[in-house]
Image (tube, grey):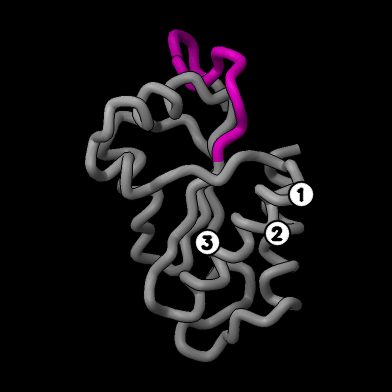
Amino acid sequence: MCAENSNVCSGGPTLIFACSGAADVGEISDKAARKLNKEGAGAMFCLAGIGGKVEPILKKTESASKILAIDGCALDCVKLSLEQNGFNNFLHMRVTDLGMQKGSSPASEENINKIAVKGKEMIG
């Protein structure tokens, strides 16, 4: 995961960025990230701060040992937001790649847990 000369591998926290879009798969992404945060798998962090180029948020993200990006759908808003701000070494998952469909996947405990379990596996 870590490339040479990468700031992402400097031993900082594991950060989790999630889609929080209006679709059901965005809600699942958000709630799964909150679950991972609550369970101590990583710290959910502010994607809006990445997009807004908020310096303290960018600096903390640069110091992350791992970054997990959870997108709801193939628009990949989380992935693109990170990449457009210089972050290229991160784990990426997409809810719709895990058998859920935008517009017909309720944010049920079952669906949230499925994404959280996959996220935990990816973080290691």
Badge 1 crowding class, 10 Å Cα cut-off, few under 14, some 14 to 19, many 20 or more, is: few
Q: Position of residue 38 (x, y in %)?
A: 71, 51
The local secondary structure at tag 2 comes to helix
**Is residue 6 placed above or below 109 in the rendered structure?**
above
Residue at x 38% of width, y 58% of height = 76
Marks 2 and 1: in contact by CB < 8 Å? Answer: yes
Disc sitting over residue 39 in the figure: 1
Task: State the extent of the magenta-drawn residues as a range.
Answer: 3-15
**Residue 54 position in % (x across, y down):** 27, 34
Residue at numbered disc 3: 94
Question: For the point 55% across and 46% down, which residue is it?
Answer: 44
For discs 3 and 2, the disc positioned in front in the rendered view: 2
- Specify the label residue 116 is tagged with: 2
Question: Disc number at residue 5?
Answer: none
Q: Identity of the amino acid at label 3?
A: Arg
User: Which three-letter amino acid code belongs to the residue tagged 1?
Assistant: Glu
Looking at marks 1 and 2 on the same chain, the residue that comes earlier in the sequence is marked by: 1
* Magenta stretch holds residue 109: no
What SS does tag 3 mark? Answer: strand
